[in-house]
Image (cartoon, rainbow, N blue to C red):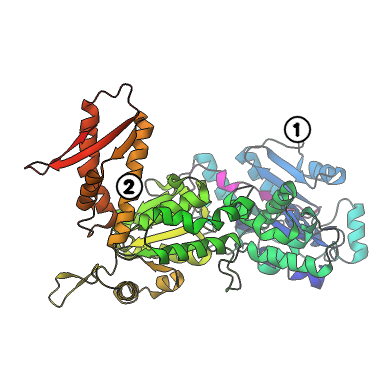
Amino acid sequence: MTSPAHTEFIPRWLRDLERLLPIRPQFVVSGNIRDHFLTPLNSAQPDSALTPAPLVRALWTTLQRQDYRFLLIFDPVEGLRPYPNEPETVALATRLFDLKLQDGFMPMSLDRLTGVMKRLTRMREARCALLIDFASRLTRHPDQLSVEEHAFFLAAERLAVHAVPIVSHPAVVTPIADAGKAAGGANAGQNKPRFNPVLWLLNRPQDLPSWFALDNARVESLNVALPDFESRVVAASSYFTLFKATETASAEERQAFARVFALATEGLPLTALSDTAQLADRQNIAHCDVEDAVQCYKVGALENPWKKPYMRERIYGAAEFIDRRVKGQEQAVTKSVDILMRSVMGLTGAQARSGGNRPRGVLFLAGPTGVGKTELAKTLTQLVFGDERAYIRFDMSEFAEEHAGARLLGAPPGYVGFEAGGELTNAVREKPFSLVLFDEVEKAHPRILDKFLQILEDGRLTDGRGDVAYFSETILVFTSNLGIYSEDASGQRVQNVAPDDPYERVEARIKGAIVDYFKYRLSRPEILNRIGDNIVVFNFITAPVAERIFAGMLENVAARVQEEHKLRLEFAAAAREQLKAWCVSDLSNGGRGIGNQLEACLINPLARALFALDLQGRSSVRVMELSKDEKNIVSARLE
């Protein structure tokens, strides 16, 4: 028998199999079948240390405890082979089933496999089992069978109905069997009736014909679930030595490592722990940085740029860098820098017991149009990732209909485009270290907004194909114009805040409108709760700020002229003042309005004038005068 200390770590499906062998002749095993499972390191000593092992070995350890002598494994590519691959076992299986092995396998059609199943269910000389691996690939479609396939499954169903449990009479006593008898374990229940079972290894139960197990109590379904926390702790302990500088670690440090490793891999198979440990071994990751190793495994990256020394150097000058591009929004700059520092220091979600999977930062930018919300997102991308074009942007006005959500996550199975995946999940898997911008989020359908709940809380999203995208290394930025306008008693749209309102009033009204929208109009306060205190309200563009924006844009125009034509662009004082007066006279459209005016009042007339001018030999050009004609078209006089 298995040691009581180990019983709790044996997967449920294996315990059920062991319990049902006397009353069920066939088993449909599906789910997490390609994982590893905790198994005694020495199969002849069930109380030995546990180690993660593939399904076949874990299955064989369970069968061996019930006096089974060997396991036949069939797959559609190689054929049939006996397991374990030991001389005595192979010889016994070869004799009892008349196997003609070639390189350890016997090629086999479905018709010959039917004969093997018949012989197996009646075999009395030795307990044995048949595992049909890759059973999901036996047919092209489970409900569109060929004549041969239908005959095969019909024979298997008939065998399940008519099979009877048998008492084996061992043909050969092996040294392993003797050891089991002496220990009172492997062969202790030799004379108890049990079936010689057929086990179907499937990705999904639906991969077998729908009629095969329908109302058939002789075919038992076993679901292979993901490992629980305690199983992950035991598995994590076995990988401790693959992490750097583990020789001097204390027992307490090893225990803490195992628990942290298990927490960080919640929802993952044991193979993920093995792969993460191999990654840590190759990258020389210390055991105290196991969470970083898990994050790198999840997002498919070997290195985490958030942990690089240059990232801290960039953040030191972040406030000044942002202020050069987003002018007059001190509150937004401060909040953004706080989030970046928190992300670099690894303190995102530190108030929660397990917050390591949440996005690195979340910003909800609200305020009037043209005040720098999208520009701030670009600036943060430039600051953190070195290229402002590296951000992932979604215009949420394109997702106003509920069915548009399929674009983000991918179509469900069976629908057109299912195999393509989702735009959002694909983009994040491709660029796990990125800023994701959801522009004008209030224009999306409320059902689509529900998708953000899982992202904000767990940092993960599963697309229609079942693939998981991890957002734990991203910065999420939402922009919104909520609160700028409201409806009066007659339903007319009126301005809720004005440019001459003090910032405190603007902030209070816009935040109030956001709360009202999520809590009462959408009835989704949970979204607002997960955004938390990361709502940043932008102020209207004031006259002093408008002049700074104008000056910055003018520098951009001069830089472009220098870049394209190697000319230094200069302005006469009167021309510059006239241009500024035109550009900042109306601030209702914010910085974007200033840019539009600059294009109409300078860039267009400048392009016409340069086009007509002989630039050969020139090193500079000076705008002497800007004037409007009766059609309000601006002309420029250059020298």
Q: Is residue 87 left or right of residue 292?
A: right
First reached walking from the N terminus: tag 2 or tag 1: 1
Separation (CA) of disc 2 from disc 1: 77 Å
Residue type for callout 1: Gln
Residue tagged by mark 2?
A: 553
Label 1 residue SS: loop
The C terminus is located in which quarter?
Answer: top left
Q: Is residue 44 above or below residue 616?
A: below
Is disc 2 in contact with disc 1, using a CB cutoff of under 8 Å? Answer: no
Residue 594 rendering spot, x and y as whole percentages: 26, 52
| Quarter location, residue 448 | bottom left
Q: Using the image, tell me which numbered label, if any, was put on residue 102.
A: 1
Residue at the image position 60 percent from the left and 59 percent from the top? 161
Residue 629 pos. (x, y %): 9, 41
Residue 319 is situated, as x and y percent measured from the top left of the image, at 48, 59
Specify the quadrant that holds the N terminus.
Answer: bottom right
Q: In this view, does 621 lie to the left or right of 327?
A: left
Q: For residue 23, say whether it is visible.
A: no
Q: Is residue 369 visible?
A: yes
Q: Nearer the viewer, residue 299 or 71?
A: 299
**Residue 129 inside the magenta-drawn segment:** yes
Q: Which amino acid does label 2 sit on?
A: Met
Decide which of 193, 331 is in the foreground and name it: 331
Specify few, some or many for label 1: CA neighbours under 10 Å numbering under 14, 14-19, or 20 or more. Answer: few
Highlighted range, magenta: 122-144
From this view, report whether residue 120 is shown above or below residue 186: above
Residue 24: percent from left, percent from top? 65, 63
For residue 447, above or below residue 431:
below
Tag 2 secondary structure:
helix
What main secondary structure does the magenta stretch of the protein show?
loop
